[in-house]
Image (cartoon, grey):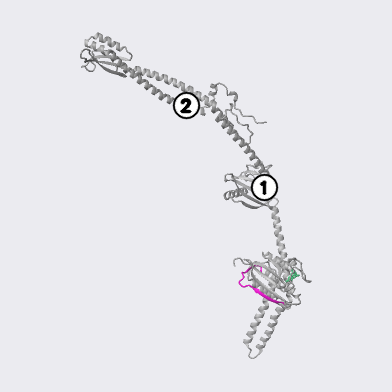
């Protein structure tokens, strides 16, 4: 159904003019206009009246003065003759005639030589104020005219004043009446044509609510195309329609946002700058014990969280709003049953259309599950590392077992030499006198042999010892030399010659020394074992070190054995891959896991002209 057009009190529109004037508001535009019109026209009327009265006064006065001249022209001759004849009766009659003329109040004749008030004849009353006085010469007739007297005339201005005052009253009254009539007409017209519609418009615009489906505004009159009021009404109706559409769009956007919020399994909310919730999803409303999101709107954390916690939340919000940087908070909550819940909260500042901070947006999720998984992953990682260490240790012990015979031989040599030397020393002591100098020399050799044997045993113990891996810088060439010393006997036993090309000035390696030695030991042992199966040709073992990419050292162990087939260069690193009857197949797998744990790489390739090359990289100390 189309919305009904708004009409305003049409039942009262066409009632009498007076009734509608009575309804005109005392403080409206029409009344203001009325006051101004009355004031303005009163001032104009006053000015015009004064002007008109001045003009009228002047013209009356000049007509009075010209009447004097007429009297002079009409009477001076006969008056002159009467005066010449000293006919006082005649003079009196003549003066009485003049006195009867309008406004003339006094008239007199005096001799020309007399002065002041010595009149021959005087009629009427002398005027003391508001008077015009004129004197004319009286000339006698005859052959030689000469002035014989003076005609003195006095007229009063009081009548002119009375006329002017009466005129003023008429003008003022008529103008006032006209002004008031016109003003009231204006008042009525303005009210009828404009202000009542403006009030209707104001009432209608005041009632506009974006959510209400209001009818378009119509005035209490028929349309006047192109008239300002209809233009205003059209503009307002357009604005109202736009506002309504905007409200609909806003409603849709809000509904979309609510749908998005509700589909987030986490707790999600939007707060204003005062910490009041302005949008929340079902998840958080339910978690705070509300039946629905709308129940939580307008509340603050203080309404449902312990004050201490609410203050913390408020502080976090303020921090996020001040810094404009998102804040991630992980906190542990102790539940009533003693279990713990991990909550991760991410808060971000909310900005309005002008870029000003308008509040905060927050999302919180239960991290307990992830925390447990992380803990489990850490635990299994730790166990894996432990197993790896056990395995590496077992591998070291097994390799040492393999080397036992040759190492025993190695240790045996200095011990045997010590025995021989000790016997020689005894002999030098038994001669008379004992040759102390020889004894000293022999004892020095015993000490160095003992040290040699001791250092072999120490290295073996270090390799066999089960210690947690340590990352500390060490001289890689020195560590490799120690391994070569341990395997020298084994190499000799297998007829292999060991060559080294250890680069000078290498930066210190930064990894676990024992683990690195274990890798080198495994590679050397594999090389010796591989070459021992070759019946002819040289058995050359070359161990080299050098710089790799910046931050890395490269170690290579090359042999002249049968080599690794190109398609098995990766297989050899698989656990339990072995081609030996007594082999375990774990050596290279352990080596690779050790190197990779340090971030390096271990790979096999063909050696030139024959044999295999195993190379690996280890990180160097960063500040060297
Ligand atoms: N230097 C080498 N030359 C040729 N083959 C080798 C060499 N080193 C290792 N291999 C091959 O890789 C396999 C796996 O070596 P490894 O993991 O050390 O186990 P094992 O030594 O117990 O066999 C060996 O059995 C051998 O076939
Ligand atoms: Mg091996």
Report the front residue among 608 and 386. Answer: 608
Highlighted magenta segment, given as a residue range: 496-513
Residue 544 placed where, x, y %? 66, 72
Give the farthest residue toward the right.
Answer: 581
Residue 309 placed where, x, y %? 62, 49
**Could you tell whether 425 is left or right of 180 in the image?**
right
Give the farthest residue toward the front.
Answer: 143
- When asked about the image quadrant of residue 63, the answer is top left
Quarter of the picture holding the N terminus:
top right
**Could you tell whether 598 is left or right of 232 in the image?**
right
Q: Which residue is mark 1?
A: 267
Residue 59 appears in view: yes
Vertical comparison of 358 with 110: above or below: below
Q: Which mark is residue 37?
A: 2
> Which one is in front in this view, the residue at disc 1 or the one at disc 2?
2
Residue 600 placed where, x, y %? 67, 65
Q: Which mark is residue 222?
A: none
Determine the residue positioned at 68% across, 86% down. 423
Give the farthest residue toward the bottom.
Answer: 432
Vertical comparison of 94 with 512: above or below: above
Determine the residue positioned at 57% across, 44% down. 354
Residue 15 placed where, x, y %? 57, 21
């Amino acid at each position: 159904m189309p919305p009904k057009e708004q009409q305003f009190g049409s039942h009262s529109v066409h009632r009498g003019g007076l009734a509608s004037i009575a309804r005109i508001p005392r403080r409206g535009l029409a009344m203001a206009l009325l006051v101004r019109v009355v004031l303005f026209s009163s001032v104009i009327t006053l000015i015009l009246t004064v002007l008109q009265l001045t003009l009228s006064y002047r013209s009356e006065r000049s007509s009075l003065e010209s009447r004097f001249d007429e009297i002079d022209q009409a009477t001076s001759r006969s008056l002159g003759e009467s005066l010449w004849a000293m006919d006082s009766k005649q003079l009196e009659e003549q003066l009485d005639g003049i006195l009867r003329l309008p406004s003339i109040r006094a008239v007199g004749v005096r001799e020309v030589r007399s002065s002041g008030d010595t009149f021959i004849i005087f009629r009427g009353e002398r005027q003391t104020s508001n008077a015009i006085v004129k004197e004319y010469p009286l000339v006698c007739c005859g052959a030689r005219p000469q002035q014989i007297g003076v005609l003195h005339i006095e007229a009063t201005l009081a009548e002119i004043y009375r006329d002017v005052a009466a005129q003023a009253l008429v003008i003022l009254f008529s103008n006032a009446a006209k002004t008031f009539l016109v003003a009231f007409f204006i008042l009525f017209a303005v009210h009828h044509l404009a202000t009542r519609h403006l009030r209707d418009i104001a009432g209608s615009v005041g009632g506009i609510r974006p959510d209400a489906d209001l009818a378009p505004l119509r005035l209490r009159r028929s349309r006047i195309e192109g008239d300002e009021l209809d233009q205003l009404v059209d503009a307002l109706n357009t604005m109202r329609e736009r506002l309504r559409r905007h409200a609909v769009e806003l409603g849709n956007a809000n509904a979309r946002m609510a749908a998005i919020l509700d589909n987030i399994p986490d707790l999600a909310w939007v707060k204003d700058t005062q910490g009041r919730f302005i949008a929340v999803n079902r998840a958080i409303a339910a978690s705070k014990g509300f039946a629905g999101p709308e129940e939580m709107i307008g509340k603050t954390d203080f309404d449902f969280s312990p004050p201490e916690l609410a203050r913390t939340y408020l502080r976090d919000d303020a921090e996020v709003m001040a810094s404009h940087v998102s804040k991630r908070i992980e906190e542990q909550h102790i539940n009533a049953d003693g279990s713990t819940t991990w909550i991760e909260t991410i808060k971000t500042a909310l900005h309005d259309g002008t870029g000003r901070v308008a509040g905060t947006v927050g999302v919180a999720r239960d991290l307990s599950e992830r925390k447990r998984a992380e803990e489990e992953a850490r635990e299994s990682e730790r166990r894996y590392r432990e197993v790896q260490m056990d395995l590496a240790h077992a591998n070291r012990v097994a390799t040492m077992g393999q080397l036992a015979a040759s190492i025993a031989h190695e240790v045996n040599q200095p011990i045997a030499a010590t025995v021989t030397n000790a016997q020689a020393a005894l002999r030098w002591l038994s001669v008379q006198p004992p040759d102390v100098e020889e004894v000293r020399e022999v004892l020095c050799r015993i000490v160095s042999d003992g040290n040699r044997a001791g250092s072999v045993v120490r290295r073996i113990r270090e390799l066999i010892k089960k210690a947690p891996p340590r990352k500390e810088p060490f001289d890689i060439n020195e560590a490799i030399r120690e391994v070569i010393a341990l395997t020298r006997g084994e190499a000799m036993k297998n007829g292999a010659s060991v060559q080294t090309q250890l680069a000078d000035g290498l930066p210190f390696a930064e990894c676990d020394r024992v683990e690195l030695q274990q890798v080198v030991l495994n590679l050397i042992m594999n090389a010796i074992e591989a070459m021992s199966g070759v019946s002819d040709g040289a058995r050359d073992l070359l161990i080299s070190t050098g710089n790799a990419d910046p931050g890395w050292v490269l170690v290579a162990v090359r042999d002249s054995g049968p080599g690794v087939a190109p398609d098995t260069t990766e297989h050899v690193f698989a656990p339990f891959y072995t081609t030996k009857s007594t082999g375990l197949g774990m050596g290279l797998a352990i080596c690779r896991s050790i190197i990779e744990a340090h971030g390096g790489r271990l790979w096999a390739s063909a050696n030139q002209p024959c044999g295999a090359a195993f190379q690996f990289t280890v990180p160097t100390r960063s500040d060297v």
